[in-house]
């Protein structure tokens, strides 16, 4: 029977060919989407394996400068010993993230430590101190900003096989073992070729699961729609087959066979399309890095699974087309449409999300995933009921178009709700993902998230000596665009509550840090929660700047103790460098200054040569690096980066939305064509074409708009729920736009399609 | 061969029964014409006899086996083994060439493709279309298409052929030729033919006529053919 179906698929003409073409298109889209989704996991793993050598979280290490008890003796200028020896067969490896512009550079520092030290993949040898290997793209980027050889004399290229992607920015520079040690290096005895697998976070799982489900749903609906294109012909043919003795199973198999050929062609085409778009998708990047195109490969099991799922979806769609068929003396008809199932469990599913949000049940992403799945199912279940209610309401209207369209909607609620399923899914997903983009974007503008002013760069020079930090400050002052440089010592105040302080010149620090707070000499309390004897004593806000009149002479850099003072000065929340709880006024250049600068605040004008500043900082002392507001954000929150990564899949949701509207439009156009005889009869009785077109528009656009809005609201609610769990701001404007704008756009498109297809004179159509 | 007793069927929502208490017995090699005005229940009766519709009351037996009491699959099996059907518009599948269309009943019955093709070709030759086996219905005349339909109805050698206005879409000359072919082919195979028609000329070919009105056999419904006495058929 399936062979007969194949024969019919091959022999089809006209609408049948369009139907086959649409099934092919559905399978192509579905296969491509599925393969891309299933490739993300393996691609992450392959890329991580290839780049595992840069993260020195392997091997064991011990502090070579530590004594038997593990304590390290600090010299007078607070630096570690000048020389660190390491045994043979090891290499001291450290590293940090640098930047060129806003692009992250992975800097690997290797301290040659003895004979037979392992050489990491990607370089020919361990570079000598002052030398560096550069990835090809990094050479170009540094040349663009005039900072060639920032990380050392260029001695060669990092091999492409050791990079995450071809344009990856990587430098491998040689340092002394002592410097490597100071930069928190690890002693490496060998390099593995596999990275620790990173499990997918719940948000990613949610995205992938909903993505796979949505892709399959769209394929099924597209196949059903494709079959509807030829429904009249197929009905007659199926009626003939039934009259000739074909039972239901035989009819189903013929339908399957008919969908199989375009399904296979589409699945194979989808495989080809996947291979074709891989290079483009690989450039989109995920988690701060792109991929090689070859990384995006789900394995043969994944490929076969994808093809199987798509073919399965095609067969499910084909079987769905022969459901409820009855043969009557005039041919073949569908059984009288069953009444839409009542709300019951559909309604229960729908209220899952708000109920969970109100109850504040478990604060975990799986809850969001479950509630989102429930919301999708709930909407799909209640959609026919909604359509029926809308139809009854429309039928109460006064115009003939309203009555006609409303009656048709009410009578064929399930038929009308079916093609809207992809639209429901798409409009539910779109606001969810769209909400995450402005949420993440808002975060970078939020002073609570990033306190650093965009005109203040912060150099971390934790291993610099007093003289090195002073010299660096002098060099930075000479850079074009730099206004002032303040040296800052970070200290820890341990009192009733442990807190962090800055030590240095208060006016210099507040000016360089763009801290709009006065320097007030006084004493301080540390935290509003600390119970102090004097109840009248005002509290100081965290992050307020003031000079603390506490004697810190005789303290060390590692543990600076203060007594909790009395008295207070306070200031409003400032927008500058992330502030500490107070500033201890001290002259860091004084011979008796017990602490040294570990940070430099660099105030600069817009357009200052930040790259020159960065080069100076990163060449000044081991592990020194410069952060700007943007780079601080990039390194701030893993969760935020996951959001950023996940929202790139917004493109998928949008593609689904387009496919959904396309499917629904074709479905309605098809329904319109099949309604031709009835419309022709009405037209013949004197009803103008315009009225028929309006009826079609009502019939098409009304349920689309209402259901899409409803799903948009549910999607937005889920997004708010997710953002609440992640403690992220809710972008109400964007959510509103997606919740109502997208459905209105979809409904307008569908209404226009209905008007256009119905505006032709019905009598002029050719019918089977 | 084919016996229907007290058949009754009322469509949902209809005011009266489409078929109300019809008895009909058709003997082997007998040709029965069912006549009557539009809406009198002729086609419904035909579909009840074919097992496409299930009566609300009454029974249909084909070669002693209950058709009306069978399951849907059982009735489908009877149609593909024992019953051939011919329709006014031929109901040919437009995507298929004539030979593959005629193969359909055999393929549906699980007969191997080669064997089905051989038998279909023979059936087409028997109706004079041996030259047109590869032609699609859209490229055929009405008469040729109806001959293909006859070949399809006979290819599995059914014991009874049910024809619904088989000449309704044809001109008189072609209709006569098609009807002659249908009757001769059925008789040549020893089968019976029940033909629903408006056409007096078609009805005249039958051994017996059954006239229907408003779902029942009219009082003067049992008539012999113009050319001969009724055979062993009875209409009550």
Image (spheres, helix red, strand yellow):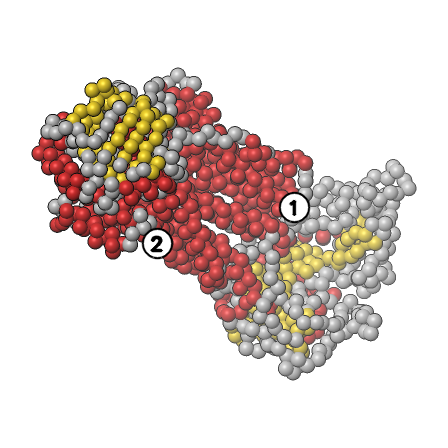
Residue A54 versus residue B151 in the image, above or below: below
> What is the quadrant of residue A107 in the picture?
bottom right
Which secondary structure lies at badge 2? helix
The numbered mark 2 sits on a residue in which chain?
Answer: A
Residue visible at 60% across and 50% down?
A: A202
> What is the quadrant of residue A348 in the picture?
top right
Which secondary structure lies at badge 1? loop
**Mark 2 packing: few (<14 Cα in 10 Å), some, or many (20+)?**
some
Residue visible at 41% across and 18% down?
A: A397
Circle number at residue A265: 2
> What is the quadrant of residue A698 in the picture?
top left
Residue visible at 13% across and 31% down?
A: B205
**Same subunit: marks 1 and 2:** yes
Residue under numbered circle 1 = A364
Task: Give the percent coordinates (x, y) of residue A5.
Answer: 31, 48
Q: What is the distance, in whole Å, between disc 1 and disc 2 at their CAs?
A: 42 Å
């Amino acid at each position: 029977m399936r062979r007969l179906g194949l024969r019919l698929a091959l022999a089809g003409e006209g609408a049948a060919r369009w139907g086959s073409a649409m099934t092919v298109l559905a399978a192509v889209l579905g296969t491509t989407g599925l393969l891309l989704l299933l490739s993300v996991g393996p691609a992450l793993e392959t890329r991580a394996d290839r780049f595992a050598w840069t993260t020195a979280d392997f091997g064991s290490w011990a502090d070579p400068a530590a004594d038997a008890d593990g304590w390290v003796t600090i010299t007078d200028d607070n630096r570690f010993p000048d020389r660190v020896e390491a045994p043979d067969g090891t290499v001291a490896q450290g590293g940090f993230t640098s930047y060129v512009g806003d692009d992250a550079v992975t800097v690997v520092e290797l301290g040659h430590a003895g004979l037979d030290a392992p050489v990491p993949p990607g370089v020919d040898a361990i570079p000598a101190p002052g030398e560096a290997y550069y990835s090809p793209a990094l050479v170009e980027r540094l040349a663009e900003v005039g900072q060639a050889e920032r990380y050392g004399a260029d001695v060669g290229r990092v091999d492409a096989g050791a990079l995450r992607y071809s344009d990856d920015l990587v430098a491998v520079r040689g340092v002394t073992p002592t410097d490597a040690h100071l930069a928190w290096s690890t002693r490496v005895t060998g390099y593995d070729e596999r990275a620790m697998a990173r499990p997918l976070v719940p948000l990613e799982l949610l995205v992938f699961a909903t993505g796979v489900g949505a892709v399959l749903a769209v394929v099924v609906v597209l196949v059903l729609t494709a079959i509807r294109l030829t429904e009249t012909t197929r009905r007659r043919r199926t009626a003939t087959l039934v009259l000739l003795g074909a039972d239901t199973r035989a009819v189903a198999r013929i339908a399957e066979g008919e969908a199989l050929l375009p399904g296979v062609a589409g699945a194979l085409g989808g495989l080809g399309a996947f291979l074709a778009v891989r290079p483009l998708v690989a450039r989109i990047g995920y988690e701060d890095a792109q991929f090689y195109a070859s990384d995006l490969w789900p394995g043969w099991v994944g490929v076969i699974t994808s093809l199987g799922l798509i073919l399965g979806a095609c067969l499910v769609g084909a079987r769905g087309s022969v459901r409820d068929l009855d043969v009557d003396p005039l041919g073949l008809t569908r059984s009288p449409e069953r009444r839409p199932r009542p709300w019951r469990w559909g309604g229960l599913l729908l209220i899952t999300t708000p109920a969970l949000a109100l109850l504040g049940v478990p604060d975990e992403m799986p809850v969001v995933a479950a509630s989102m799945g429930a919301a999708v199912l709930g909407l799909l279940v209640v959609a026919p009921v909604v359509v029926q209610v809308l139809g009854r309401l429309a039928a109460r209207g006064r115009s003939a178009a309203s009555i006609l369209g409303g009656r048709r909607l009410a009578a064929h609620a399930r038929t009308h709700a079916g093609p809207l399923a992809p639209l429901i899914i798409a409009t539910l997903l779109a606001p969810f993902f769209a909400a995450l983009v402005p949420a993440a974007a808002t975060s970078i503008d939020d002073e609570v998230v990033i306190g650093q002013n965009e005109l203040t760069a912060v150099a971390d020079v934790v291993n610099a000596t007093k003289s090195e930090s002073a010299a660096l400050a002098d060099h930075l002052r000479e850079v074009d665009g730099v206004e002032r440089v303040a040296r800052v010592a970070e200290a820890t105040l341990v009192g009733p509550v442990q807190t962090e302080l800055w030590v240095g010149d208060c006016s210099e620090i507040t000016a360089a840090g763009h801290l709009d707070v006065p320097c007030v000499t006084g004493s301080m309390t540390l935290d509003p929660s600390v119970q102090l004897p004097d109840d009248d004593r005002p509290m100081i806000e965290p992050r307020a700047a003031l000079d603390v009149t506490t004697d810190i002479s005789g303290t060390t850099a590692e543990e600076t103790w203060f007594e909790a003072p009395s008295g207070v000065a306070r200031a409003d929340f400032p927008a500058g460098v992330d502030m500490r709880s107070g500033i201890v006024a001290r002259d860091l250049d004084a011979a008796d200054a017990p602490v040294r600068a570990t940070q430099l605040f660099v105030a600069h004008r817009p357009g200052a040569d930040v790259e020159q500043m960065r080069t100076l900082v990163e060449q000044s002392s081991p592990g020194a690096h410069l952060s700007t507001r943007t780079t601080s954000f990039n390194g701030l929150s893993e969760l935020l980066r996951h959001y950023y990564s996940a929202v790139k899949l917004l493109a998928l949701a949008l593609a689904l939305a387009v496919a959904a509207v396309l499917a629904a439009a074709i479905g309605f156009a098809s329904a319109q064509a099949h309604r031709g005889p009835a419309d022709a009869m009405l037209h013949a009785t004197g009803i103008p074409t315009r009225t028929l077109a309006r009826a079609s528009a009502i019939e098409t656009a009304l349920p689309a708009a209402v259901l899409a809005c409803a799903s948009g609201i549910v999607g937005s609610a889920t997004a708010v729920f997710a953002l609440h769990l992640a403690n992220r701001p809710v972008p109400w404007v964007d959510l509103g736009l997606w919740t109502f704008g997208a459905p209105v756009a979809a409904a307008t498109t569908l209404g226009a399609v209905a008007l256009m297809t119905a505006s032709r004179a019905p009598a002029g159509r050719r019918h089977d | 061969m084919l016996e229907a007793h007290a058949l009754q069927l009322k469509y949902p929502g209809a005011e009266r029964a489409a078929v109300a208490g019809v008895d009909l017995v058709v003997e082997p090699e007998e040709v029965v014409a069912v006549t009557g005005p539009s809406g009198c229940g002729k086609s419904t009766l035909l579909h009840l006899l074919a097992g496409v519709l299930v009566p609300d009351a009454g029974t249909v037996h084909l070669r002693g086996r209950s058709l009306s009491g069978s399951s849907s699959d059982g009735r489908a099996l009877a149609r593909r083994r024992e019953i051939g059907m011919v329709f006014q518009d031929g109901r040919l599948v437009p995507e298929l060439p004539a030979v593959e269309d005629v193969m359909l009943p055999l393929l549906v019955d699980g007969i191997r493709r080669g064997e089905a093709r051989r038998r279909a070709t023979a059936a087409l030759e028997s109706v004079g279309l041996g030259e047109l086996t590869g032609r699609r219905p859209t490229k055929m005349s009405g008469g040729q298409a109806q001959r293909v339909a006859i070949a399809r109805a006979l290819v599995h050698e059914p014991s009874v052929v049910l024809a619904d206005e088989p000449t309704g879409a044809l001109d008189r000359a072609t209709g006569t030729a098609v009807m002659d072919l249908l009757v001769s082919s059925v008789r040549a195979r020893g089968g019976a033919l029940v033909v629903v028609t408006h056409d007096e000329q078609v009805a005249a070919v039958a051994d017996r006529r059954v006239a229907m009105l408003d779902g029942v056999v009219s009082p003067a419904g049992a008539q012999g053919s113009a050319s001969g006495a009724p055979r062993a058929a009875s209409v009550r």
